Image (cartoon, rainbow, N blue to C red):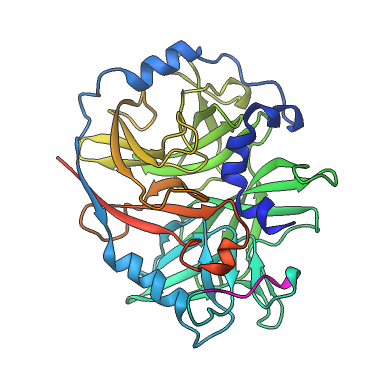
């Protein structure tokens, strides 16, 4: 797999839009589904009575500096220098687990460049998923394999498959991380597709390899889990049915903490069904990664705005329930990095991470592969503090 095809996937899918549909090995779209008119009415309608108002969004200097300094530190040459994905989970020990998809490991050259990846004759290791653990303001990288031959913490079954991370949850002291498996099916540059969803279970003290891997619902073209939320008796699981443009949000829930429980799916009429085929398109305009977070008496959905092509805007919707409807679109932030070859994507919240408000991350990337070598700062997450009133 080339660097371009893997690292640029979230945006590449959006760019090729409906041309991807013919390549997908998906079943027919779930029925019943709301119409586009209904979805747009949900999104642009009046704000929920529970909706907090976005007050400000400022750079989270602590986290931005933490990852910048760690990525630039050459005291070790087998650790993190950049990645995307950027989910997080508070471990039972109090440590923060940072969950990444495509990741660079290695050194940073003087002047802020990095060597090319091993596959292109350089020394930088490229893996499709890794972890980093933060404790007392210090980070350490976790990968599988050995220092001499690093591997993804969630290894692929063969060279034609790989896993990108979704959101994670804690169940009875065990870390459950969702992954989406992708597969190659031909020799063309875009001959790859989403294949299935799984959950990998990790012991908090042994994060370099899973205890076990279990299939998640995957029969109807929904990539679970773009986000998870524990609320009341349930763990809510949010997914995306991705046609490039549009992307549709779906909602499921599991009673209790573990994703291995019995799933049920939100239908268009607001009721729940045990049949994944009944899962409805709740709204469009979400990114492949987003978040739903309890704020005050309401629930805030934070996402990059995919109603616009290549959008630099991070937006919020709100609801009085964890499953919507989400309305009252509010602008949070316009990413300053977005310009020329550089784009941003997949903003979501980290409610367990301390900040001056709700911590939100987003990813930065480039259309030009060599930009990732020229400037290490491009392919690193950025962090915001978002306040509400």
Q: Is residue 46 left or right of residue 303?
A: left
Q: Nearer the viewer, residue 341 or 331?
A: 341
The front one of 108 and 98 is 108
Q: Main secondary structure of the magenta part?
A: loop
Q: Which residues are magenta?
A: 113-118
Residue extending furthest left? 389
Instruction: Give the x, y percent position of residue 292.
Output: 37, 40
Q: Is residue 203 visible?
A: no
Work out whether 323 lies above or below 30. below
Asked whether 55 falls inside the magenta stretch, the response is no
Above/below status of 371 relative to 357: below
Of the pair 217 and 138, the residue shown nearer to us = 138
Q: Quadrant of residue 243?
A: top right
What is the x, y in percent for residue 201?
58, 58
Question: Seen from this angle, which residue lies furthest right?
Answer: 187
Say which quadrant the N terminus sits in: bottom right
Name the quadrant of the C terminus: top left
Looking at this view, name the residue that lies furthest to the front: 340
Observer-nearest of 210 and 358: 358
Query: At x 30% / y 17%, what residue is drawn?
Result: 45
Residue 354 image offset from top left, x and y in percent = 26, 61
**Does the image show residue 219?**
yes
Residue 10 as seen in the image, left or right of residue 284: right
What's the residue at 57%, 57% (across, down)? 101
Q: Position of residue 190 (x, y in %)?
A: 74, 42
């Amino acid at each position: 797999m080339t660097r371009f095809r893997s690292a640029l996937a979230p945006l590449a899918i959006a760019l090729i839009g409906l041309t991807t549909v013919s390549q997908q090995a998906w079943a027919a779209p779930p029925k019943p589904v709301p119409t586009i008119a209904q979805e747009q009415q949900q999104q642009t309608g009046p704000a929920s009575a529970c909706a907090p108002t976005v007050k400000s969004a400022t750079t989270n200097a602590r986290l931005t500096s933490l990852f910048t300094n760690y990525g630039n530190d050459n005291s070790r040459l087998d650790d993190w220098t950049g990645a995307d994905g950027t989910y997080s989970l508070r471990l039972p020990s109090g440590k923060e687990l940072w969950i990444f998809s495509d990741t660079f490991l290695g050194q940073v050259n003087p002047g802020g460049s990095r060597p090319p990846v091993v596959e292109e004759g350089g020394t930088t290791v490229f893996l499709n998923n890794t972890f980093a653990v933060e404790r007392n303001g210090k980070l350490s990288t976790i990968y599988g394999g050995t220092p001499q031959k690093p591997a993804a913490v969630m290894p692929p079954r063969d060279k034609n498959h790989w896993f990108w991370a979704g959101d994670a949850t804690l169940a009875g002291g065990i870390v459950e991380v969702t992954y989406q498996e992708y597969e190659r099916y031909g020799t063309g540059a875009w001959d790859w597709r989403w294949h299935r969803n799984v959950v990998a279970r990790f012991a908090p003290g042994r994060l370099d390899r899973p205890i076990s891997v279990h299939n998640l619902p995957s029969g109807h073209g929904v990539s679970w889990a773009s986000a998870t939320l524990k609320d009341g008796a349930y763990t809510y699981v949010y997914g995306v049915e991705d046609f490039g443009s549009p992307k549709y949000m779906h909602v499921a829930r599991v009673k209790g903490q573990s994703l291995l429980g019995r799933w049920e799916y939100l239908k268009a009429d607001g009721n729940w069904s045990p049949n994944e085929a009944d899962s409805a398109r709740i709204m469009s305009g979400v990114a492949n990664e987003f978040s739903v977070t309890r704020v005050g008496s309401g629930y805030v959905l934070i996402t990059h705005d995919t109603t616009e092509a290549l959008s630099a805007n991070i937006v919020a919707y709100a609801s009085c329930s964890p499953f919507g409807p989400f309305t009252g679109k509010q602008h949070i932030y316009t990413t300053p990095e977005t310009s020329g070859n550089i784009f941003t994507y997949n903003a979501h919240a980290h409610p367990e991470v301390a900040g001056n408000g709700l911590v939100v991350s987003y990813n930065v990337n480039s259309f030009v592969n060599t930009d990732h070598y020229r400037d290490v700062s491009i392919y690193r997450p950025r962090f915001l503090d978002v306040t509400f009133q």
